[in-house]
Image: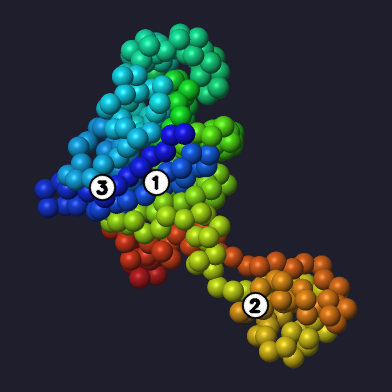
Amino acid sequence: MTSIDVQNLTKEYGTTRAVDRLTFRVEPGRVTGFLGPNGAGKSTTMRLALGLARPTSGTVLIGGRPYAAYDAPLRRVGALLDPQAAHGARTARDHLLALAVSNRLPVRRVDDVLEQAGIAAVAGRRVKTFSLGMRQRLGIAAALLGDPEAVLLDEPSNGLDPEGIVWIRELLRGLARAGRTVLVSSHLMNETATFADHLVVLGRGRLLADTPMPDFIAAHSARRARVRSTDPARLHAVLTRAGHTVTLADDGRCTVDGARAAEIGALAAADGIPLLELTDEQVSLEQAYLTLTAGDTEFAATPLQEA
């Protein structure tokens, strides 16, 4: 199986260190979300992985080899870094056909990926007439052309309409289920939460997190449970007697700080209190991400009230 191995990777531009001794591994069979503020080094890392820039030190290996070592790289690695890269005067079909011929891929794959990306109906139109969303679909079609084992996508949802966002979400999940290695850079936290299994988070070129997404969220969530009963006053009394700090809302829900749902459920069951709702509260991926990267954001706006 093909993995992406980043080992002690560093990239300097003059006095600026864009990537700083970065080490992580992207495993097959799951979607890895690649997160970080603007300037964190995500795009630079992807460019280094694809041989579009040369590292100052360290390596990126895909399937145990540098990208440049593959004779027909589209058969092993598919990538979308810039949806504007396709020549505007070419038709979508001709753009993909040129890639297929240069990588010794069967021509039938052109029609396959045009259909898969939902742009077969506009295959004869010139790329310069395409909207951003259509260019994104064309770029993703190009990334899939060689039926690659590894796929690297930089902001693939950018410019897509709601149907397109659902499509790319299902596409990423399908690639992972098929055992492919999928690395997706995104700034859309709520969208990333719908498809990513694992997260790699950068800040100022350094690795901040490399962890399964549920673990990442749990690590930035306080212990807190939410519970609702047909008898909220009695439930409140039972929880208070057990030493819990309980906040009772107007709708009858209780929020219990410092507790897990399993503990609350056991107390309610022991006293015969029926429950309508019981869950552990967790922060969103966006909230967890902002907490982690708060000190590593290079560009931050002034809050409106301060401005």
Q: Which residue is mark 3?
A: 9
- Which of the two labelled residues, at mark 1 and mark 3, occupies the earlier sequence position? 3
Which residue is pictured at 53% across the width and 60% down the height?
A: 215
Q: Which residue is mark 2?
A: 259
Which residue is pictured at 45% across the width and 8% down the height?
A: 107
In this picture, is 151 found above or below 117?
A: below
Q: Position of residue 238 (x, y in %)?
A: 78, 86
Looking at the rendered structure, the kind of residue marked 2 is: Ala
Which structural element holds mark 1? strand
- Which of the two labelled residues, at mark 3 and mark 2, occupies the earlier sequence position? 3
Q: Position of residue 220 (x, y in %)?
A: 50, 67
In this picture, is 208 found above or below 274?
A: above
The reply to whether residue 41 is visible in this rendering is: no
In this picture, is 5 found above or below 284?
A: above
Looking at the rendered structure, the kind of residue marked 3 is: Leu
Q: Which residue is mark 1?
A: 25
Looking at the rendered structure, the kind of residue marked 1 is: Arg
Tell me, yes or no, whether the two marked residues, 1 and 3, touch with CB atoms within 8 Å.
Answer: no
Tell us which disc is closer to us: 3 or 2. Answer: 3
Which structural element holds mark 2? loop
Q: What whole-number distance in Å separates the C-alpha atoms at marks 1 and 3?
A: 12 Å
117, 181: nearer the viewer: 181
Which residue is pictured at 45% across the width and 20% down the height?
A: 145
